[in-house]
Image (cartoon, helix red, strand yellow):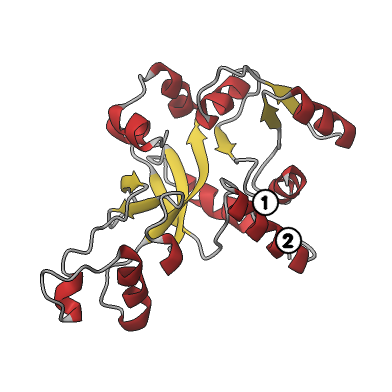
Amino acid sequence: MLAWVYEAASACPQLDRVLIATDSDEVAELCHRNQWPVQLTSPDLPSGTDRVHAVARHHHADIYVNIQGDEPLLKPQHLTALLRPFTQHHVQVSTLKVLCTPENIANPNAVKVVTAADGRALYFSRATIPYDRDAQARDGQSSQSRTTEAQAGIRQYVDGTAPQYWKHIGLYAYRKSTLERFPNLPPSLLEQTERLEQLRFLENGIPIHVEPTEFDTIGVDTEKDLQRVESLLLRQSSILS
């Protein structure tokens, strides 16, 4: 799985260098055998952003990209979209969103994001956001009837009346100055509640620009995710096609 991610990242022309950061001796040994650049980091780092910050202390760049090793469906197009907003000098952090499929709307492992008209993230959540309060009225159901969030999501694709749901893709890019601030900010209440590190930026007034992409990914968080990814990878010769 790591090989797929490394190859896709290395194929992105906007990246000057790709380095694997890990706290695992086993992963580091795998990298050495394959001649992939690797840096061992402390096992005590609480998040991926903290790990990127640890690497940034030894490798200078203007912009750093955080790519999770459990995203084997990564494409160079993801990274191109991720870096595109940095042509605007006010952008400090960027990430991606993709249209949420009906089966993922109520899935807490598929993080949802809502954004302002200019692309700024308003909130990330494992819950279904935005909440479709008028779903029952559109369906002609009584107030006592209960409509599941998944059904509301299906309506979105059938008749276009339900709100648009966006799934967050957990790739990030940071300007150096903003990345340096992150470890000095205390973990926020929302971050700890949702278990979403990006909320620390929002709670401290640091905007995150969310760029849309047409390419979905599957983060491998569960055994079911792994099975889906293995099936997809077996059906395609390369994620770079």
Name the kind of residue labelled 2 in the image.
Answer: Leu
In this image, 197 relative to 122: left or right? right
Residue 101 appears anywhere in the view:
no
Residue 194 appears anywhere in the view:
yes
**Residue at mark 2 to residue at mark 1: CA–CA distance:** 9 Å
Q: Assess disc 2: are there few (<14), some (14-19) or many (≥20) residues with their C-alpha within 10 Å of its C-alpha.
A: some
Q: Is residue 147 above or below residue 51?
A: below
- Front residue (pair 160, 65): 160
- Residue at position x 83%, y 27% in the image: 29
In this image, 218 relative to 92: left or right? right
Q: Measuring from the top left, give residue 141's x and y in whole percent.
A: 15, 78
Q: Measuring from the top left, give residue 137's x and y in whole percent.
A: 14, 75
- Front residue (pair 136, 172): 136
Tell me which numbered mark, 2 or 1, is placed earlier along the sequence.
Answer: 1
Which quarter of the rendering shows the C terminus? bottom right
Q: Is residue 51 above or below residue 169?
A: above
- Residue at position x 64%, y 47% in the image: 14
Question: Does the residue at mark 2 contact the one at mark 1 (Cβ under 8 Å)?
Answer: yes
The residue wearing badge 2 is 233
- Residue at position x 54%, y 31% in the image: 48
The furthest residue to the front: 144
Corner quadrant of residue 106: bottom left
Corner quadrant of residue 33: top right
The residue wearing badge 1 is 72
Corner quadrant of residue 39: top right
Query: Under tag 2, what secondary structure?
Result: helix
